[in-house]
Every structure is written in structure tokens, then in C-alpha cells.
Amino acid sequence: MKFTIDRSEERSILLVKEERIDAHNSGELKECLLNLLETGARLLVVALNEVRFIDSSGLGALLSGYKNANLRHARLVLVGVQPRVQSMFELTRLHQVFEIVDRVDDVVVSK
Amino acid sequence: MASSCIAVDIAVPNRTRYLALVGNIAECLAKGLEAYSGDRDTLAFHLNLVLTEAAGNAIRHGSPANEERLLHICIEVRDDDLCIRVFDYGQGFDLDHLAPLDAGELEEGGRGILVMRALMDSVAYKKTEEGNVLEMRKKLA
């Protein structure tokens, strides 16, 4: 899976550089989220601006990251969710679980 | 819709890297259904999604020990009846006895069937002598 990571003391931003997340690359996404959390990310922002398609395994990978963040008292925030990806969150009602905001700049950083 | 029949048989290697290809075939097919009066783009997205879910399941659970086996999929549109069949050669499962996963639950897996059931009119899983088949149907009216 192609992605870039922008890490600062305040937050870590994972920009997913794929149009599609499915069973082929969702395992890598899960691993990447876990790795960032294990190495101390307290606020993990996942930017999905380029993602046009996500299946249930992709949602599972994000959910794994969300649960892992909660266990570590960290936060996982989704940004740039495109309409069809949003429709998958709504279909599975996971939009009620995740913290989803429009843009990276909209993420409120807790002091 | 005018009387018509389109049937597409797909056989690809039993690997997840081909999920995008089979999903895109379903998407292209839906976009070409000129007699369909609904939103073809949405239908195309939904068919990509349900086929990706079904094919992903078949690859994961169908015949994991035999990657060389082909994944076999049939898509048929007969007038306004759409039928997608995804074949697998694994142990099979009883669709009616899977623990139902409600929307909003935090389990990481188990949403594929939920998605298929939400977007198609019917989802059935049958064991046959030639293997197992997941059959999804939808009325294109």
C-alpha cells in the first residue's frame, strides 16, 4: 500500500495514497496504523482524500486502529472521507463510531 | 427494459490482487446497462462492492491451500434480473447460521455479508457437487 507519513510531536498524519482499499492492501493498512500507535502516536490522523473505494476489510483495518488507539489512550481521526467511502461508513453505521472531520486543519488538538 | 441477456464468465487467479479487476468488470458492465432507468453510477459502485466482498470471501475461505486454483465468477443480466455467482471450493458455511453482526458493532470482521445483504435483494450460499456458490440477486427496475 502506498502512503506517506507526516510525524510531528503534536500529531501523526497517515496519508493513504491509494484509490482503493480492499482485502489486498487492508492488512498493510492495519499494520501501519498499529506501528504508528506502538511507536507513540498520540493523535493519529488518517487522510483518506485519495481513497474512492473501501470494502469491509478496509473498514476492519481502520476499526482495528481505532480500538488500538483507544487501548493506548490515543486518538484516531479520519479526514478527507469521500462520498462513496462515507456511504460505506453509513451503511455499516461506523460513522457513529469514528471521529470524522473534513480536513486536517479541522482536527482539534487536545492540550 | 427491452428483452436482453448479458452473461459474463470471469476466471482469475485465486489472489486478492485481482479483486480490483473483477470489481472493475462488474462496474463497467453496470455502466453499460443503457436500459436501466436508475442511477447507473451508483449501481456500478454497488456491484463493484458486493463482488469485491464475495470474491474476497471466496479467496480467504474458499481454497486457501491452493492459490493456483482459479476464482470463478458469473455475472448474468437477463432483462431486469441481475444474478452474480461466486464459486469456491472450500469447506463452505451456513449463511443462515453465521452470527449476525449488527451495523455499528466493533468487531473487525463480518461486515461483508451485511454489505451484500444491504445492497442486493437476496444473498444465498449453496453447496453443490461442483463446489459452493454464493449467489446474489437484484431486480434492476
Image (cartoon, rainbow, N blue to C red):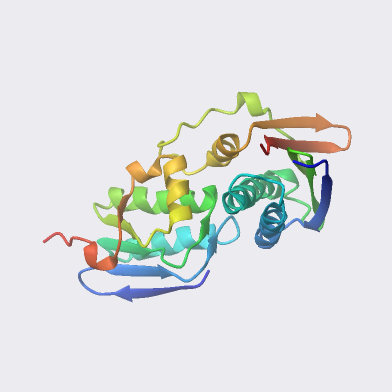
Residue B62: percent from left, percent from top: 73, 44
Residue B45 in view in this figure:
yes
In the image, taking residue B106 as reference, residue B82 lies left or right, namely: right
Q: Residue at x 45, y 39 (%)?
A: B107
Q: Quadrant of the N terminus of chain B?
A: top right
Q: Is residue B100 above or below residue B7?
A: above
Of B45 and B60, the residue lying toward us: B45
Residue A49: percent from left, percent from top: 41, 66
How many numbered tags mark residues here?
Answer: 0
In the image, taking residue B99 as reference, residue B26 lies left or right, namely: right
Q: Residue at x 69, y 58 (%)?
A: B28
- Residue furthest to the right in view is B129
In the image, taking residue A94 as reference, residue A71 lies left or right, namely: left
Residue B88 in view in this figure:
no
Q: Quadrant of the C terminus of chain B?
A: top right
Of A40 and B99, the residue lying toward us: B99
- Residue furthest to the left in view is A111
Of B78 and A58, the residue lying toward us: B78
Residue A72: percent from left, percent from top: 27, 53
